[in-house]
Image (cartoon, helix red, strand yellow):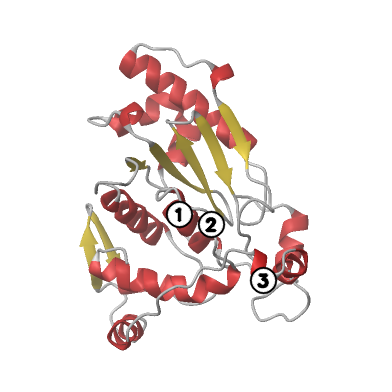
Amino acid sequence: RQCGAEISEEVSFRLRLAPVLSRRPSALDVEEKKFPRSEKRVEHFSPLTEAMEREVTAAFGKGKPDEIMSSAFKLKVTREDIHTLKNLHWLNDEIINFYMNLLVERNKKEGYPAAYAFSTFFYPKLISGGYKAVRRWTRGVDLFKQDLIIVPIHLTVHWALVVIDIRRKTITYFDSVAQKGDKICETLFRYLQEESQEKRNLELSFSEWILHSMESHEIPQQLNGSDCGVFICKYADYISRDKPMTFTQNHMPYFRRKMVWEIIHQQLL
């Protein structure tokens, strides 16, 4: 599957009018006028070394599409999958799932919140078959002992993300084109209620939880029609480190190349 929420006509129109190379005033330019550079948090990322860049370029080069470039977490990433990380390409399930597993693995270290990530195939299975269809997905995993539960959402032409924060009792929807995900949050809360009843015989009270769709001014937004997958990966990265999101659309080409190296080496920088 390629990048996939059903994007509204208004959002689709806006994305078609705002390609990466467009020089018309962007949301970033408007933000710059509102908040002078001196008042904004500016994050400086370490550039990839020359050796790293050569590896990334080689991974993007010619070769057999089905060549295995990385294998871990019972997942395999091929050269064809890696090529979805080229600029302006849509990320596929394999890249998203592998990267989410890298985040979970990193968060096993001391000082990070305990995290669990569902596969991109979890949510479609849940909405098509209900709780019974996914009841066994958490066999051997106690979701309520996690700090964060990460749920990548693939709908039709867009990637989005939901993060369930067990510590704060929140379910938050993150969308790089600012669509609302209230119904998705409600569906996942009902799942959590059933999981709690089934595995712990405890009832979750809706009144104790906060469900929220992030607004466009609350999180970084994409300005093209292809970077939604990278955005949700970076949302998950920052959230799983309890860090404020200080990246922008301009960082996407750098993140794409960095992700290639990280996936090949099965290690987050």
Q: Is residue 223 visible?
A: no
Would you name the residue on which mark 3 appears?
A: 37
Residue 51, quarter of picture? bottom left
Q: Secondary structure at mark 3?
A: helix
Cβ atoms under marks 1 and 2 closer than 8 Å? yes
Report the residue at 49% width, 54% height from top: 235
Kindly identify which residue carries mark 2.
Answer: 245
Residue 146 seen by the camera: yes
Q: Is residue 224 above or below residue 183?
A: below
Q: Between disc 3 and disc 1, whose residue precedes?
A: 3
In the displayed structure, does residue 170 sit left or right of residue 34?
A: left
User: In the rendering, at what x and y percent does residue 71 appear?
Assistant: 21, 62
Instruction: Please say if 96 is above or below 123.
Output: below
Per the model, the C-alpha gap separating discs 3 and 1 is 22 Å
The amino acid pointed to by label 3 is: Arg
Nearer to us of marks 3 and 1 is 3
Q: What is the secondary structure assignment of the residue under circle 1? A: helix
Q: Where does label 1 land, which residue?
A: 238
User: Quarter of the image containing the C terminus?
Assistant: bottom left
Q: Are marks 2 and 3 in contact (CB under 8 Å)?
A: no
Give the crowd class for mark 2: few <14, some 14-19, many >=20 residues within 10 Å: some
Disc with the residue nearer the chain's start (1 vs 2): 1
Check disc 1: other Cα within 10 Å, few if <14, some if 14-19, many if 20+: some
Q: Nearer the viewer, residue 238 or 1?
A: 238
In this view, 22 is above or below 209: below
Closest to the camera, between mark 2 and mark 3, is: 3
Depth check: give the residue in front, 8 or 111. 111
* Relative vertical location of residue 124 with respect to residue 219 in this rendering, above or below: above
